Amino acid sequence: MPALVSPPRTVVIVGGGISGLATAFALREQAAAAGLSVRCIVLEAGSSWGGKIVTHRIGELTTEAGPDSFLSQKPAGLELITKLGLTDQLINTNETGKKAFVLSGGRLHELPEGLVTFVPKDLGPFLRSGLLSWPALLRMGLDVVIPRGGSQGDESVASFFRRRFGTQAFDRVLEPLMAGIYAGDAEQMSLKATFPRFLELERQYGSVIRGMMAVKKQAAPRAPGGLKRTMFVSLKNGLSDLVTALTARLTQQGVELRLGCQVAALRVRSHRLGRWMYDLILNDGSALSCESLVLATPAYVSAELLRPLTPIAGGLLEMIPYASTATIAMAYPAADVAGAVEGFGFIVPRKEGRDLIAATWTSLKWPHRAPSDQVLIRCYAGGVGREAILQLDDQSLIARVRAELSTVCGITAEPKYVEVNRWWKAMPQYTIGHLDRLAQLDAALSRYGGLVLTGAGYRGVGIPDCIRDGALAAGRVVRYLAGPREA
């Protein structure tokens, strides 16, 4: 008598950004390794995949509406690139003598590498930059003798870096570098949730600087012939190629990808002791049932779906705030901006009171972004406390940004191409107590086996963070489905 074959277990992933797609990819991989038959469906309310990963190709220009790169130091991104066969498309940032600048006192100052890594390779530029006064430099150096903090509670990013390096170093360098990643306010950002490595260095070595130097000495040498990667990497023809390759692979693997499918409501029922069925009511009135559900949607969207199940979880999710931002890409004839742009661009401390968060000279930073006779610039606006500018119409927003570029670096020419990309409620903010709230959220959802949350709102906003968290979410689903089917 032939053995009975168990029907595949249905898993629905809501959200088709990089988190949802990465979850589906890891789910197929991990389910196969566990010998588990799974039917995977990914639902996306919008008309395209990839969320904020959006590449525009206009003639010979390549612009990124959302992220333009990802950290090579976090392995999940490079590992996925390798699995998708895109390694030959990876590109490093261009080599240039001057990397980046910071606006201080209305003037651009070169940002020495030592101010970013805390371990200066060359003390000359570090001391001559004029960015920090001599007393501020000395105060920054006191990090090596200041006792480690005594509190075990959460601390704001601002509090920690002022405590370790002083007010001037924080205001002029660390705040725009750190808060710029989240488009947030360092006074509100949780150190444990955003930059826990610095806290670990303080606790282990008693000093961030000593810790960074020790880590540098302990770093494994690169294998002979190994390809060196810059801190940030991208893809030759834009990051959308990652999404295209990922969706193609998922389709080949039998994953059902459905665009334009918005979930209107979620219902839960117990179909056997200790097991749940999740019924999704879609916007067209149809229904979809699954044994495991992954919500890869923004926290505020997940809050609305989960509130009928558990008001506590809904309330905790609503406590994760989101900031709105915009990117403005402009292309100029190279001759019109000659001498005005060098390096990779500049960052703007909050203390400067400017409309811009930062500006990147895209075609100087990355190869294959513009022809040699053009310069492509990308400006960033908005963020916590600076979102009013986003209420302007496109022409007014562009005029404000151009006025900033004129004041800061003397660019007065008329751009030949302009695009504005607005991202409403797109950047989650990990405010003080974030990790404690996540623990409470896990407790509130613990009775609903097979229900998993993933995405930028929880454990990292970068592309590698989302890929890694998606793999962890897939692991939780596989362990649940492979477990005993009855309590």
Image (spheres, rainbow, N blue to C red):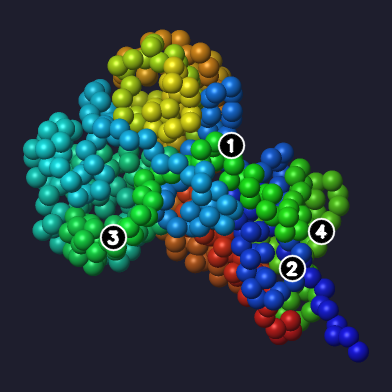
CB within 8 Å, label 3 to label 1: no
Label 4 crowding class (10 Å Cα cut-off): few <14, some 14-19, many 20+? some
Reading the image, the residue beneath label 2 is 38
Q: Residue at x 37, y 42 (%)?
A: 179
Q: Viewer-proximal residue, 292 or 471?
A: 471
Residue 154: x and y, percent? 35, 60
For the residues labelled 4 and 2, the Cα–Cα distance comes to 15 Å
- Can see residue 41? no
Q: Amino acid at mark 2?
A: Val
For the residues labelled 3 and 4, the Cα–Cα distance comes to 51 Å
Reading the image, the residue beneath label 1 is 54
Reading the image, the residue beneath label 4 is 288
Q: Residue at x 23, y 31 (%)?
A: 110
- Can see residue 217? yes
Q: Amino acid at mark 3?
A: Pro
Reading the image, the residue beneath label 3 is 221
Up-down: is 128 above or below 32? above
Q: Amino acid at mark 4?
A: Leu
Up-down: is 376 above or below 170? above
Label 1 crowding class (10 Å Cα cut-off): few <14, some 14-19, many 20+? many
